[in-house]
């Protein structure tokens, strides 16, 4: 299957700093990518939909000024957590659907990024 | 709105015994259903999916799931559990062709005891 990578896999930062997380589709183009957040022992919650060439769509309750999303190319979406605070500590996972003329465009998930804010 | 229910937070099973992890869903139209497994501090690993066709779907690592439209269920099963199957399992649904995000259940932690 197709591969989606994330970088970094884990990051520790001080409160107030900004952290950028990259999501790349390695062997296919993704005009859309999805960003999820997972708190410990909880399910994945959709944060936003990243759209290549246009603004991201944020879910209710997600601060767009805090979680900046840029879909710079057909293979890269970035999530920047601005002025991070300890409550932003979480596991962030991206996914991308692979288009290709099939009945279903299967989604492929990145390995996740563990963010710890001290 | 789409939703997925995993009624069990935790499932315990002895090694070698059959296991079932339950999932029910609610979606308008024909559902696309998925099971994923997550090991500690790791991303999601795809197990299997139902798109159309046979109601019994076979997936990775000996897992299978049965789509039951009348009961709106998609339970995950394995005939003989292994200790290495111990992990967090997520059921997910997509209402259409995959260009929308998946809606996940809360997850079920499976513990296989030797």
Image (spheres, rainbow, N blue to C red):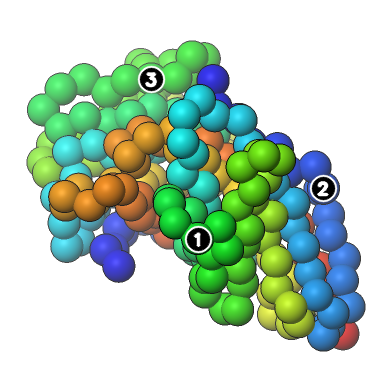
Find residue B98 and report its image quarter: top left
Residue, disc 3: A58
Residue, disc 1: B54
Q: Nearer the viewer, mark 2 or mark 3?
A: 2
Across and down, in percent, residue B19 comes to 79, 69
Tally of numbered tags: 3
- In the rendered structure, the answer to whether residue A92 lies left or right of residue B109 reads left
> Where is B114 relative to A116, above or below?
below
> Where is A20 relative to A1, above or below?
above
Across and down, in percent, residue A90 comes to 56, 41
Across and down, in percent, residue A55 comes to 21, 20
Viewer-proximal residue among A49 and B57: B57
Give the CA separation, mark 3 to mark 1: 36 Å
Residue, disc 2: B8
Neighbor class of circle 1 (other Cα within 10 Å; few <14, some 14-19, many 20+) is: few
Question: Residue shown at 38%/27% (left/top)?
Answer: A48
């Amino acid at each position: 299957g197709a591969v989606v990578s994330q970088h970094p896999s884990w990051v520790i930062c001080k409160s107030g700093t900004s952290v950028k997380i990259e999501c790349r589709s390695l062997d296919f183009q993704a005009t859309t990518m999805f960003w999820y957040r997972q708190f410990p022992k909880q399910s994945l919650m959709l944060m936003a939909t990243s759209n290549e060439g246009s603004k991201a769509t944020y879910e209710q309750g997600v601060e767009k000024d805090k979680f900046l999303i840029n879909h710079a190319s057909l293979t890269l979406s970035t999530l920047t957590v601005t002025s991070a605070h300890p409550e932003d500590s979480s596991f962030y996972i991206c996914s991308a659907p692979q288009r290709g003329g099939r009945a279903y465009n299967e989604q492929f998930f990145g390995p996740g990024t563990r963010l710890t804010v001290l | 709105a789409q939703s997925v229910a995993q009624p069990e937070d935790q499932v315990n099973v002895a090694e070698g015994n059959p296991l079932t992890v339950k999932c029910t869903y609610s979606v308008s139209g024909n559902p696309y259903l998925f099971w994923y497994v997550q090991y500690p501090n790791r991303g999601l690993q795809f197990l299997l999916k139902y798109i159309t066709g046979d109601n019994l779907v076979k997936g990775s690592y000996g897992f299978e799931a049965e789509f039951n439209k009348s009961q709106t269920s998609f339970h995950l099963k394995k005939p003989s559990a292994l200790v290495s199957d111990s992990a967090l399992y997520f059921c997910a649904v997509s209402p259409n062709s995959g260009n929308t995000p998946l809606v996940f259940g809360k997850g079920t932690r499976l513990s296989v005891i030797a």
